[in-house]
Image (spheres, rainbow, N blue to C red):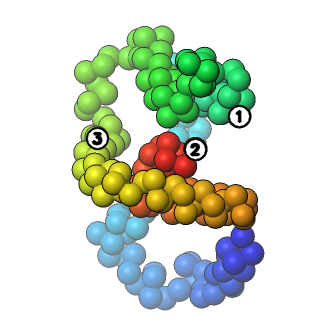
Amino acid sequence: LLGILAIGIFSWFRGKDLDKDEAFQAFIAIPENRHYVYGDTATLLDKKLPTSNWIAMWIFLASIAVVALLGAFSELRPAFDGKPLSMVLVIQMFMLLSGALIIIITKTNPASISKNEVFRSGMIAIVAVYGIAWMAETMFGAHMTEIKGVLGEMVKEYPWAYAIVLLLVSKFVNSQAAALAAIV
């Protein structure tokens, strides 16, 4: 945390402000470069969003709050054979429920979702990540017992390292949800 703060302060005073940097001003003088840097000038400032957008946002935020609550208090989750429902399943169920409620309550046309650029980019990312996650699951699945043992002992001895362990495992398996399932 201190390192991030130090580099942030260093970066704050490094270089010139862009409006005073001759090289940058020359670069954006070319219209193609200006469009590349600034993109579309469309903004949502001073625009009134439809009520359905606000409803969708509140449904999503409520789902996140419920997932966080169920994660913090495992006794609130349903138990099967004495074990509370896995957080991986809770996250999946509530996010799917959230999406379904948004579509139903806001009367969104499901066909229009697939035409959205954000949705398309997300689907491409899911396919790409799924392949990597499958490979990681295959490679690490065979050694997960050893990995859990080593990292679990590390977390027991150094509890502050839990976040680092989660970060490392999520990078290994390329999925935060899979990391949570592996470590918890």
Residue at the disc numbered 2: 184
Q: How much space separates mark 2 and mark 3, taking CA atoms? A: 28 Å
Q: Of 175 and 101, which appears nearest the observer? A: 175
Q: Amino acid at mark 3?
A: Met
- Residue 83 in the figure: left or right of residue 130: right
Return the x and y of residue 58 as percentages of the image width and height.
61, 24
Q: Nearer the viewer, mark 2 or mark 3?
A: 2
Residue at 60% x, 88% y is 15
Q: Nearer the viewer, mark 1 or mark 2?
A: 2
Residue at the disc numbered 3: 123
Query: Mark 2 packing: few (<14 Cα in 10 Å), some, or many (20+)?
Result: few
Query: Mark 1 packing: few (<14 Cα in 10 Å), some, or many (20+)?
Result: few
Disc ID at residue 11 = none
Residue 57 visible within the image: no
Q: Amino acid at mark 1?
A: Ala
Residue at the disc numbered 1: 72
